Amino acid sequence: MTTYAAEKQDTEPTLYEQIEEAKNELSRLYCRFDFENDPDRMDEIIFLLCAAESKYSALMEKARRKAS
């Protein structure tokens, strides 16, 4: 019998996987930004970019702390 915490840990992505996914999300958003022409959509993409950059920075800081 497994516990919920053990199941969650098995399915939770590693820190490295989280960083890679955040990096991929940033890349996708930068591509959308480069090709978008609608000013309203640009605002949305900029907002999403700021959030994705914050998430990536937080994950990198977590990795730095873990490495020390």
Image (tube, rainbow, N blue to C red):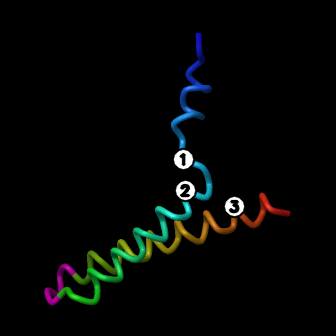
What residue is shown with label 2? Answer: 17
Q: Quadrant of residue 41?
A: bottom left
Contact (Cβ within 8 Å) of mark 1 with mark 2: yes
State the SS at label 1.
loop
Q: Is residue 55 left or right of residue 38?
A: right
Q: Position of residue 1 (x, y in %)?
A: 59, 9
Q: For mark 2, does the 10 Å Cα neighbourhood hold few (<14), some (14 to 19), or many (20 or more) residues?
A: few
Contact (Cβ within 8 Å) of mark 1 with mark 3: no
Q: For mark 3, does the 10 Å Cα neighbourhood hold few (<14), some (14 to 19), or many (20 or more) residues?
A: few
Q: For mark 1, does the 10 Å Cα neighbourhood hold few (<14), some (14 to 19), or many (20 or more) residues?
A: few
What residue is shown with label 3? Answer: 62
Magenta stretch contains residue 19:
no
Q: Quadrant of residue 12?
A: top right
**Range drawn in magenta:** 37-41
What residue is shown with label 1? Answer: 13
- Residue at point 36%, 72% (across, down): 48
